[in-house]
Image (tube, rainbow, N blue to C red):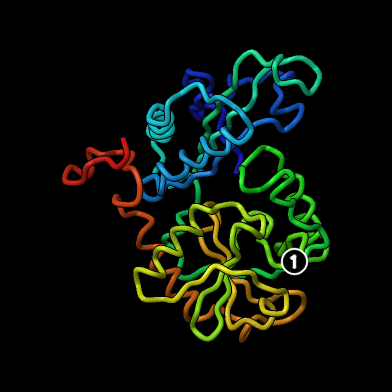
Amino acid sequence: MVLDGRTIVFLNGQYVPLSEAKISVLDHGFLYGDGVFEGIRAYDGVIFQLREHVDRLYNSARYIRLEIPYTRAQMMENIVEVVRRNRFRDAYIRVVVSRGEGDLGLDPRSCRAPSTVIVAEPAPPIHQQEGPPKVRAIFSSYRRDAVDATTHEAKTLNYLNSILAKMEAVSLGHDDAIMLDRRGFVSEASATNVFMVRDAVVYTPPPTAGILHGITRRFVIHLCRENGIDVLERDITPFELVSADEVFLTGTKAGILALVELAGRKVGDGDVGPLTSKIYGLLVRAFRDPRYGVPVYPEEREAVPAYGL
């Protein structure tokens, strides 16, 4: 979606129109991908899992030794304010903190202060869809970066590993790519976490497979356990994934996607599986629940205290 230049953006402590939001060409986020980010969703005026997203942002920043110039509470307030000022109800929100403007060269000591940007755009209301979208995927020839390298446990601005996998899938006429870790076990898709269903048990790869600690992934695990669905974190082989009864993907922007074809083979019967449908329904009901997020317009929900602020 092309944003209107009048969309209000948070930039380094100021709320400005998008048309006036500028970052230096010497910003190390632009030059070297030196920074962190979060993608967050608002559903019907509730920002889902806002505290959890902000916690992950700060954990990623700590890993790359980046000091964010706002407290977590201030960051949450800034995010809410961007959505409120734009009068959005269903939105995708991007928060970026880069190392900031510096000299040409890798040394981050030349960067004078971090750059912070919060931008939001209207997004289709996932919670109004009848069921999860169906997608087709390949196994990518690109391996997920190792946990002792540029680990994807930190959500940094360097997404080339995922971009290459996505481009490979699209060039072969598919929607996405399943990436393996350096041992050959299933890691994740280009921008979503992977779950499979076998004999009514849900499985998902563990952090040792080089995955991002997905906010939606963690919430789905919580929903499964809360609703009597067995879920286990363990290594998954490509064979197991191809022969699974059901496979689905989770992510903040995507919600839940049903993987119906993998590497030219049908997954299950080639349609959305019953457990995938059930979990999708549970998640969709949670999206707008103020218990799991922050109301942007608390005056509409007088009986519900703002969560996390």
Residue at position x 37%, y 33% in the image: 84
Residue 188 coordinates in the image, percent (x, y): 65, 61
- Check disc 1 and report the residue beneath it: 174
Residue at position x 66%, y 48% in the image: 152
**Which quadrant, please, contains the C terminus?**
top left
- SS at mark 1 in the image: loop
Residue at position x 44%, y 76% in the image: 230
- Check the image and report above or below for 104 versus 259: above
Res. 238 image quadrant: bottom right
Type of amino acid under label 1: His
Left or right of 210? Residue 10 is left
Left or right of 258? Residue 80 is left
Residue 149 coordinates in the image, percent (x, y): 74, 45
User: Nearest the camera: 307 or 266?
Assistant: 307
Q: Confirm whether residue 149 shows in the render.
A: yes
- Check the image and report above or below for 309 versus 274: above
Q: Confirm whether residue 121 shows in the render.
A: no
Left or right of 176? Residue 304 is left
Q: Residue furthest left?
A: 303
Res. 267 image quadrant: bottom right
Mark 1 crowd level (few <14, some 14–19, many ≥20, 10 Å Cα): some
Residue 65 coordinates in the image, percent (x, y): 61, 29
Left or right of 86? Residue 161 is right
User: Nearest the camera: 127 or 227?
Assistant: 227
Residue 117 coordinates in the image, percent (x, y): 55, 27
**Which quadrant, please, contains the N terminus?**
top right
Q: How many marks?
A: 1
